[in-house]
Amino acid sequence: MNALLTVKELSEILKVSEATIYRWVHYDFIPHIKIGGAVRFDEEAVQKWLRAKETRGRTKIALEFVRLSRE
């Protein structure tokens, strides 16, 4: 079984407030598990969620701008 993180532990890892974590849970923005009244986070599921949120930056936009300005 993967490690389950508390709201406090996850907020420290992600460098956001506990209120932000609770807001994300409320809106089902982040994968979470509710056990009784407690909220827990599967560390592996959160890492996968973070990778899905990753972006490559604006390289493509910059290249399109260069192409358009040369025409």
Image (cartoon, helix red, strand yellow):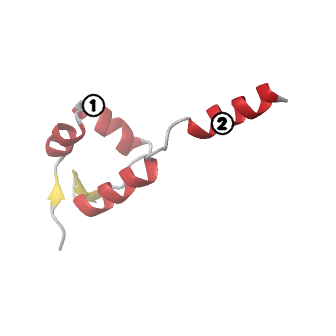
Q: Which residue is mark 2?
A: 63
Q: Quadrant of the C terminus?
A: top right
Residue drawn at x 24%, y 30% is 17
Q: Position of residue 48 (x, y in %)?
A: 36, 59
Q: Position of residue 64 (x, y in %)?
A: 71, 36
Residue drawn at x 44%, y 42% is 27
* Mark 2 and mark 1 residues within 8 Å of each other at the beta carbon: no
Callout in the foreground (2, 1): 2
Residue 41 seen by the camera: yes
Q: Which residue is mark 1?
A: 19
Amino acid type, label 2: Leu
Residue lying farthest front? Answer: 70
Q: In this picture, is 3 found above or below 19?
A: below
Q: Position of residue 46 (x, y in %)?
A: 31, 55
Q: Picture quarter containing residue 3?
A: bottom left
Q: If you read the primary sequence from the N terminus, does the residue marked by circle 2 or circle 1 appear first?
A: 1
Residue lying farthest right? Answer: 71
Q: Quadrant of the N terminus?
A: bottom left
Q: Position of residue 51 (x, y in %)?
A: 39, 53
Q: In this picture, is 44 found above or below 69?
A: below
